[in-house]
Image: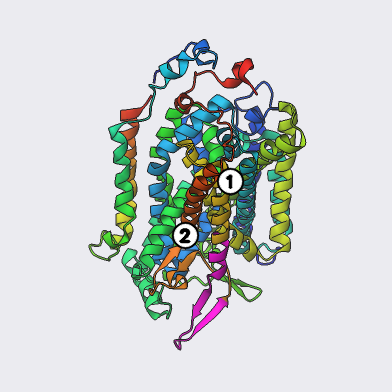
């Protein structure tokens, strides 16, 4: 984790060059699109609203959604690692 | 007050409770600041919490005692629909991942403490900021009151009755929050969350074993819902409930990080990476919540009958009763302490967040424009006391149902700050008066729809009895809008839709009328600032 120490003078409004120099910073990344996966996986109930297959006698509806938590963690971790500052 | 009290349970509970109270006071010295008399210190713990503290703090903040009691109670009563808490807390973190780091950056640069601070600077409107602050306070107050309901459920299960124990618990809570600020719940959260994880993991191993396995548990639940005449329950979602399930999860997720207490937790963290890492780590709590929800079915299989007080069945007592039934007394005491302490952490953070809104957006904006940091801190400390007394009075003097109704509406009204706060982080396209008009429309629709929602009881003879005429839930039947369907939708969703539509139309109108736009004090690159970047307050010449 490296944080760039900018010259404080650069950020004063009196220095008009600052905004163009610093505007290059951005949160844009193609990796961010992965974050959509957990939403797609859980916000459409017909996808998982059934009993079978059971896992340890637990209906699909329940273990699928619990498993989706794991999916969400994996996806978020990937995005974090690929975009960390 | 102490008839039929289980002495062992009460002793374990009291010992743990006293332990965290001491921690709460000691917290003032933890990661000690030069001077607690500053809102950044008292209200945000020094804005310097690393990933672990933040994980415990936000987890302890969002997953409240009331959640732990109410979610299984809902599953116990209605089945699958109560499991919405799981998709809700799955989707929330990916959704806010990018939004929160922008909010953190802009708040870091400008020294914002509340979401209304941001709205004030971004949209140049003190009216809009005031509305956002008031919405936050109104949405938070009943939430604090509900934490008391969580403690009360536990006390009831231990056989302790009367109001005195709750008053004592809240007085202690108020005292150490006043003394230590956000450091108190941050430190106590370690104990709370450790106890919760311990109890739930033991519960999902021991209880299914005692009840004869998951097969028995789901079988008992299925039998109960098959016998029930209510078409809305079941261990799977009935067709028409699916839209409500999805919109409830999605709408609640949109609302969660608009709550002032969630934002307080986020702003207290050290840098952007702490927030990003936590978005990946916080779902651990969602997993616990999912297991906890299943306790509702275990209670069915164990034949738990909820306690009835004054002729009213209190489903919120089923989890404590289940623990009481299944665990030896000493461990039941630990479990009750987990829930009781689980109420203290969010109650403290919520009161701090509400107090900060009061100080920054009402006191400083309207009453004492030149307030010093010290005066701000003092104002917040006093306000945190007032907020807690208010919550206590509300629970003791009004029907607790009133707080539950208000909390239900709380989620819907806080959602109405989404355009100004969350969309405001991305765009200045909306006109400030357009946002105000949208807010008003959203509030009106939110109140009207929840007012219309009835709570029905389905009697065995096929008749339907209306138990509550108004505020009977958050699922709004679409047939009320003249649509020929049995489907329902989350009321907050409709309200937000109305809000957005009005905000867009009103923005065009106000712009055509050439109504002044208001000054935007933020600059695009400030939304990406990270720790180490200078803050505006460090540059004296630009402080307004």
The mark that comes first in sequence, 1 or 2, is: 1
x then y, percent, for residue B226: 37, 78
Residue B267 or residue B367, whichever sits in front? B367
Q: Residue at x 74, y 31 (%)?
A: B369
Residue on which the image places disc 2: B494
**Are there few (<14), some (14-19), or many (20+) residues within 10 Å of tag 1?**
many
x then y, percent, for residue B510: 55, 45
x then y, percent, for residue B167: 73, 53
For the C terminus of chain B, the quadrant is top right
x then y, percent, for residue B308: 60, 73
Q: Is residue B524 left or right of residue B364?
A: left
| Outermost residue, front side | B513
| Outermost residue, bottom side | B461
Quick one: SS at disc 2? helix
**Are there few (<14), some (14-19), or many (20+) residues within 10 Å of tag 2?**
some
Q: Is residue B494 left or right of residue B9?
A: left
Q: Is residue B248 left or right of residue B267?
A: left
Which image quadrant for residue B382?
A: top right
Q: Chain of mark 1?
A: B
Image: magenta residue range = B446-467
Q: Is residue B263 left or right of residue B197?
A: right
Instruction: State whether residue B358 is above or below residue B31.
Output: below
Whether label 1 touches label 2, CB < 8 Å: no
Residue B240 or residue B22, whichever sits in front? B240
Residue on which the image places disc 1: B346
Quick one: SS at disc 1? helix
For the N terminus of chain B, the quadrant is bottom right
Instruction: Say if the magenta span includes residue B436.
Output: no
What is the number of the mark on residue A25?
Answer: none
């Amino acid at each position: 984790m490296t944080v760039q120490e900018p010259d404080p003078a650069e950020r004063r409004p009196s220095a008009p060059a600052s905004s163009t120099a610093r505007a290059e910073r951005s949160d844009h990344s193609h990796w961010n699109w992965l974050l959509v996966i957990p939403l797609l996986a859980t916000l459409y109930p017909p996808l998982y609203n059934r009993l079978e297959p059971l896992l340890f006698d637990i209906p699909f509806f329940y273990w699928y959604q619990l498993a989706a938590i794991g999916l969400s963690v994996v996806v978020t971790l990937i995005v974090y690692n690929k975009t960390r500052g | 007050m102490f008839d039929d009290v289980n002495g062992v349970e009460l002793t374990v509970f009291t010992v743990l409770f006293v332990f965290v109270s001491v921690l709460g006071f000691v917290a003032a010295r933890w990661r000690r600041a030069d001077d607690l008399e500053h809102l950044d210190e008292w209200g945000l713990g020094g804005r310097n919490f690393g990933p672990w503290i933040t994980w415990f703090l936000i987890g302890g903040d969002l997953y409240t005692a009331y959640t732990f009691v109410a979610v299984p109670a809902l599953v116990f009563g209605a089945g699958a629909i109560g499991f919405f808490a799981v998709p809700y807390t799955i989707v929330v973190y990916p959704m806010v991942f990018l939004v929160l780091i922008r909010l953190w950056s802009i708040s870091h640069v400008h020294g914002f403490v509340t979401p209304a601070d941001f709205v004030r600077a971004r949209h140049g409107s003190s009216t809009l900021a005031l509305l956002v602050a008031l919405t936050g306070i109104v949405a938070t107050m009943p939430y604090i009151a509900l934490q008391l309901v969580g403690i009360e459920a536990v006390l009831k299960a231990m056989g302790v009755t009367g109001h005195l124990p709750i008053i004592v618990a809240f007085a202690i809570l108020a005292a150490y929050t006043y003394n230590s600020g956000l450091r108190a719940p941050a430190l106590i959260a370690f104990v709370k969350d450790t106890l919760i994880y311990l109890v739930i993991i033991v519960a999902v191993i021991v209880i299914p074993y005692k009840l004869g396995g998951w097969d028995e548990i789901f079988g008992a639940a299925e039998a109960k819902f098959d016998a029930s005449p209510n078409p809305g329950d079941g261990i799977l979602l009935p067709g028409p409930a699916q839209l409500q399930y999805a919109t409830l999860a999605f709408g609640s997720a949109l609302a969660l990080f608009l709550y002032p207490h969630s934002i307080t937790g986020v702003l207290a963290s050290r840098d952007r990476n702490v927030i990003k890492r936590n978005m990946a780590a916080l779902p651990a709590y969602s997993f616990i919540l999912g297991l906890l929800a299943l306790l509702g079915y275990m209670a069915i299989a164990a034949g738990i009958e909820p306690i009835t007080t004054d002729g009213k069945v209190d489903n919120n007592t089923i989890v404590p009763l289940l623990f009481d039934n299944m665990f030896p007394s000493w461990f039941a005491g630990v479990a009750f302490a987990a829930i009781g302490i689980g109420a203290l952490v969010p109650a403290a953070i919520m009161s701090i967040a509400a107090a900060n809104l009061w100080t920054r957006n009402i006191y400083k904006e309207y009453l004492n424009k030149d307030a010093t940091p010290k005066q701000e801190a003092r104002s917040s400390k006093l306000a945190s006391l007032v907020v807690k007394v208010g919550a206590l009075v509300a629970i003791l003097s009004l029907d607790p149902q009133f707080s539950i109704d208000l909390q239900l509406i709380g989620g819907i009204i806080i959602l109405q700050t989404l355009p100004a706060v969350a969309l405001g982080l991305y765009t200045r396209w909306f006109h400030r008066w357009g946002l105000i008009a949208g807010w008003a429309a959203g509030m009106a629709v939110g109140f009207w729809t929840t007012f219309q929602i009835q709570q029905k009881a389905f009697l065995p003879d096929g008749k339907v009895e209306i138990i509550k005429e108004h505020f009977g839930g958050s699922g709004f039947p679409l047939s009320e809008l003249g649509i020929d369907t049995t489907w329902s939708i989350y009321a907050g969703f409709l309200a937000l839709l109305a809000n957005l539509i009005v905000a867009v139309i009103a923005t065009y109108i106000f712009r055509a009328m050439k109504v002044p736009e208001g000054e935007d004090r933020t600059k695009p690159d400030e939304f990406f600032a990270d720790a180490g970047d200078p803050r505006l307050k460090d540059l004296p010449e630009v402080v307004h």
